Image: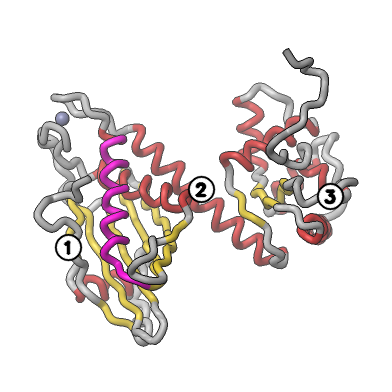
Amino acid sequence: MADPTTPQTATEPTPTPAPAPEALSGPAPHLTPDTPALIPVIIDPDDYATLQTHHSFPHTTDHPAYLTHTETLLRTHTTHGQHTLALHFDATHYTDFCTSHSIDPDTPTSRARYTLELAAHGPHLTYQGQDIDTLIHQLIDRAAQHACGELAHLLLDDAGSCKDCGQDRANAAIDRAGRLLDAVLDRAGTGSHTLTCTCTADGERLTIGLTAEQETPDTPTRFDDTDAARLVAVLAAALAASNAPCTRCTTPDPEPAPRSTGALLLRTTAPHARDRLTGWRLLQGHLHPLTAAEVFDAHCTNPFTGDVIPPLPHTDFLPGYDLTPGSTWPTP
Ligand SMILES: [Zn+2]
């Protein structure tokens, strides 16, 4: 048995040791391409001020100077060929993390532990040399998507099970949502696709996006698996909220939702062609194709204010296509 105190040779590269915000005090002494780097970025000035109340927090500059230093550090790592992850460090979430793990937030070790948590499960992205302002916007978007996905799972946690056969309604909804996403993309054709899914349930309105690309009819559609999982979660939450009949025993829900609990909109762009917009409405467990007029309204109405948005030029508004030929739901 190996002596646990003896350093082991790793077959997989391990992240630069626990940087947390401390890492921002200067570049690591040994930067090699086989050592990925994790760089937390404190975006919110109030978050930065909160962390500065911790005696162990090493940064004493103002927030703009800290961000400039962070950008330099990110560029230093990528200049050395390191795979570098930028992580959205949120002070409130950090405090909650420390509370839930019964650890003192005012230690470098706790910040490092949270940094690793962010890399595994939190909002982050691969740094590709963008300027700090662009990176901040991207991280804010990523954090919003992450929060949306988490909220969708919270809604699914309340979905319960079928009163007759015991089927877990959350798992069934996720399975069905995944098949629907496949059905939409299988029939979307070639081009660059942007899907937008909304869910309205329990007073919440979730909106999530997914981009996908199919270059030729014979090549698979490519998309980010994490982004796809989030869209599936939001669509599943909308399915569960619609109180559809059980998919195993077809026991109807006693109180089917009278109104639509979600929608799926698709925009496709392709070279030398007009953009195509289409969509579906989720009602009582089914995705119903929208008419062309409804697609126009959905794309040209601000969902929050109801104000009319000018239609995009060079765009065709098309009715939603049939996702389920011969059956209610896509079959395996
Ligand atoms: Zn059932």
| Amino acid type shown at disc 2 | His
Give whichever of discs 2 and 3 has the lower sequence position: 3
Residue matched to label 3: 31
Q: Which residue appears at 71% of the width and 65% of the height? A: 129
Residue 177 highlighted magenta (yes or no): yes
Find out whether the residues at labels 3 and 1 contact each other: C-beta distance under 8 Å.
Answer: no
Q: Secondary structure at mark 1?
A: loop
Helix, strand or loop at disc 2? helix
The residue shown at (68%, 62%) is 128
Residue 45 screen position, x and y as percent: 72, 53
Please tell me which residue lies in front, 220 or 94.
Answer: 220
Give the numbered dot on residue 146.
2
Q: Which residue is mark 1?
A: 322
Give the camera-side residue of 331 and 41. 331
Is 209 left or right of 15, judged from the image as shown?
left
What residue appears at the point 27 percent right and 30 percent down from the top-left corner? 168
Mark 3 CB lies closer than 8 A to ligand 1: no
Ligand 1 falls in which quarter? top left
Considering only vertical position in the picture, is 224 above or below 9?
below
- Give the Cα distance between marks 2 and 1: 30 Å
Residue 142 drawn at (x, y percent): 55, 54
How packed is label 1: few (under 14 Cα within 10 Å), some, or many (20 or more)?
some
Q: Amino acid at mark 3?
A: Leu
Q: How is the image coloured?
A: secondary structure
Label 1 is placed on what type of residue?
Asp
Quadrant of res 155: top left
Quadrant location, the C terminus: top left
Point out the stretch of residues depicted in magenta. 171-190
Asked whether 120 falls inside the magenta stretch, the response is no
The tag earlier along the polypeptide, 2 or 1, is 2
